[in-house]
Image (cartoon, rainbow, N blue to C red):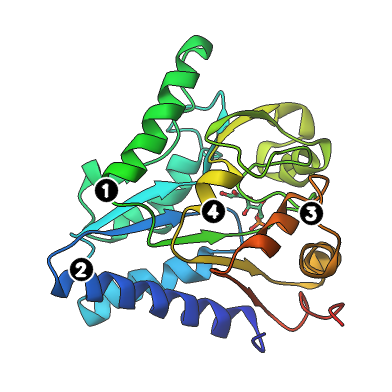
Amino acid sequence: VFKNPKEASISVAHRIAKIIQDRQLNNQHAVLGLATGATPIAVYAELVRLHKEEGLSFKNVVTFNLDEYFPMGPTAAQSYVYFMKEHLFDHIDIPAENIHIPDGTLKLEDIPAFCLAYEKKIEEVGGLDMQILGIGRTGHIGFNEPGSAPNSGTRLVTLDDLTRRDAARDFGGKSNVPTKAITMGIGTIFKAREIVLMAWNQKKAPIIKKAVEGEMSSEVPATYLQLSDNVEFILDEDAASLLT
Ligand code: F6R
């Protein structure tokens, strides 16, 4: 538990930088699972600063984003492709071919093959070194909404009504928020060698309490993280305030 989101974010960014540098020493790729949303923005800002001011290179980094709305074009302001460029990729030296984000422009019938290929690519590069996560107020990680199975893979999902309400501001009203998304599964996330879930602010306190102290249930998918030995929750004092 950190005093504030900024200190927490800097600490997560420095852990990511350490993975990148350790891998560089061995001429290996660092494979990162990335999240969007408000939570990781300061982590990305610190990584950009480390690149610009301290020479951290991302040439050996391969990334896989957790999710993307469906349907969603890459140039739309609400797309996760746009988000990642704006907050990270446009400001660092990662090779474009190393970036992977679920494709919101696919035809419906092509989604299952795309999802299998996404999983396969993660395996082919040696698996995720670290997966960073936010948490939705439904308890979703990625877009694994209530009802998701612990062994689920990358797939097309239906977004929970609360998730769509929380996204309404970005889309100018809930009716404009897509009803679907493509997301890595809980099983996909579990394969990461380290999982770091971040949450800030009072409004996340109730779901953090459920995720950490509640009974494990598909009704709160983040409770499945209780099964992992490789997970850490990085919280600010407000998000941690209801923990006993
Ligand atoms: C984003 C994602 C979501 C968000 C969650 C929290 O890629 O997978 O699970 O992490 O909805 O969003 P924020 O950070 O905006 O509160």
Q: Where, quadrant-wise, is the C terminus in this rendering?
A: bottom right
Q: CA distance from mark 3 to mark 4?
A: 20 Å
Q: Is mark 3 within 8 Å of ligand 1?
A: yes
Q: Earlier in the sequence, mark 3 or mark 2?
A: 2
Residue 91 in percent (x, y) is at 30, 60
Q: CA distance from mark 3 to mark 2?
A: 35 Å
Q: Earlier in the sequence, mark 3 or mark 4?
A: 3
Three-letter amino acid code at the position of disc 1: Val
Q: Is residue 200 left or right of residue 88?
A: right
Residue 215 in percent (x, y) is at 86, 60
Residue underneath mark 1: 125
Residue 219 in percent (x, y) is at 83, 45
Q: Residue furthest bottom?
A: 3
Q: CA distance from mark 4 to mark 1?
A: 16 Å
Mark 2 closeness class: few <14, some 14–19, many ≥20 residues within 10 Å? some
Q: Earlier in the sequence, mark 1 or mark 2?
A: 2
Q: Quadrant of residue 32?
A: bottom left
Helix, strand, or loop for circle 3?
loop
Three-letter amino acid code at the position of disc 3: Arg
Mark 4 closeness class: few <14, some 14–19, many ≥20 residues within 10 Å? many
Three-letter amino acid code at the position of disc 2: Ser
Q: Is residue 93 left or right of residue 48?
A: left
- Residue 56 visible in this rendered orientation of the protein: no
Helix, strand, or loop for circle 1?
loop
Number of the label disc, if any, that sits on residue 190: 4
Residue underneath mark 3: 137
Q: How many marks?
A: 4
Q: CA distance from mark 3 to mark 1?
A: 32 Å
